[in-house]
Amino acid sequence: MADDLPSTSDGALVRAARLGDEAAFGELVDRYGPGMLRYARRLVNGSDADAGEVVQEALISAWKSLDSFRGESSLKTWLFRLVHRRAVDLMRHRRPTPIDDELLSRAVKVADDNPLQDVLDSELLEALQQALDELPWNQRSAWLLREVEGLGYDEIALAMGTTVGAVRGHLHRGRRQLAERMARWR
Amino acid sequence: MAMSPGTPLERATAAARAEQPEDWPAVSDSIKRKVRETVLPARRIAYVSADGSLDQDEHGSRTHVSSRVLLARLRDALRFGPDLAAERIDLTIGDDDLLTRVEVDLVCAYDTDVRQAADLARSLVEGVLVEVLGPGARPPVDVHVTDVVVGDVRRD
């Protein structure tokens, strides 16, 4: 099915996958998996192995529980929620991560070195990861879902299991913190 | 805080959006392999001879088919064209492994004659049942049209 119909909608693919069509599910995997992996990697401190584990667990879980997807959110939001939950579980077992904003105590470095005029993307991404690693978990997650993955506020709230108001707060603080940390690259 | 074009955060964000994980093909292959290896719940269903007997010889030998196999065949049969597709297929299997009822939820394209679609779906299901479970497999087949979509049900 997936090979024959490259523009198949999420709904049609979910219908087929629920009935056991592995090819249809495979198309959903390739449609949303790269973004899920990108999100997971940035969320779990840039670890390739952890990100791969999180996304695999999320998508296998999705395969087994497609019946529980009721279409109340988009499929993309539902899948990102699965990634988020597994990333939370993994990080809880791996290392302490600040959850509350009040716990954020790292000093922000002042941009006092020589400016880099033409920074390579890879260097910028490395700097971004370092800055993200310094953010509290919720700010990091909200920022990634909004600014990188393009989810709406309500979708982010569903993915993170929180409220839209909380998302707005996390985003506001996360954007400010990241801008301050990245300013050293100016 | 709005990001102005050209700020380090703006450039980093754009780079992050454009990033395509290089290891995605390997992760994707691993996921698809695990999906294939995942054993979904299934039950065995008895093959039924033309006379309604489950026994296939004088010794009482029986033949069974996994519900997973039957569901795959039904799913393929109901992927009939642009006007109808199965959304749910439920099999009721008795304690004696006999298939006692099939329920199918159908999605039809807008403007499809739902009665004709239901009749067609029922006919397709009955054909598969006989083919897979034997000439005596004649359980009731309930068809419900549960949704309509605009366009091709295989895509939309």
Image (cartoon, coloured by chain):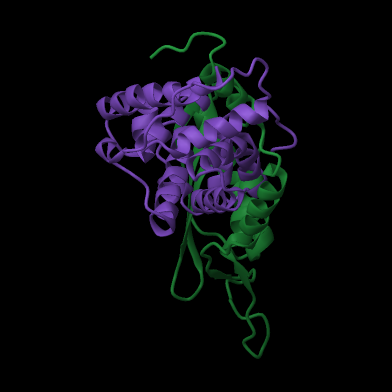
Chain colours: A purple, B green
Across and down, in percent, residue B147 comes to 45, 31
Locate residue A184, reporting x and y percent. 51, 23
Q: Residue B79: x and y, percent?
A: 64, 39
Decide which of A179, A51 is in the foreground and name it: A179
Q: Is residue B82 left or right of residue A178?
A: right
| Quarter of the N terminus of chain A within the rendering | top right
Which of the pair B86/B18 is nearer the observer? B18
Q: Quadrant of the C terminus of chain A?
A: top right
Q: Relative to the observer, which residue lies in front, A166 or B54? A: A166
Where is B37 relative to B12, above or below? below
Q: Quadrant of residue A38?
A: top right
Residue sitting at the far top = B4
Q: Position of residue A83 (x, y in %)?
A: 47, 44
Q: Residue at x 63, y 19 (%)?
A: A116
Q: Residue furthest right?
A: A4
Q: Is residue A72 visible?
A: no
Q: Quadrant of residue B20?
A: top right
**Does residue B69 sit above or below B117 in this rendering?**
below
Q: Is residue A171 left or right of residue A39?
A: left
Residue at image position (68%, 17%) is A118
| Count of residue discs | 0
Res A117 visible? yes
Residue at the outermost bottom position: B59
Along the line of sight, the residue nearer the viewer: B141 or A37: A37
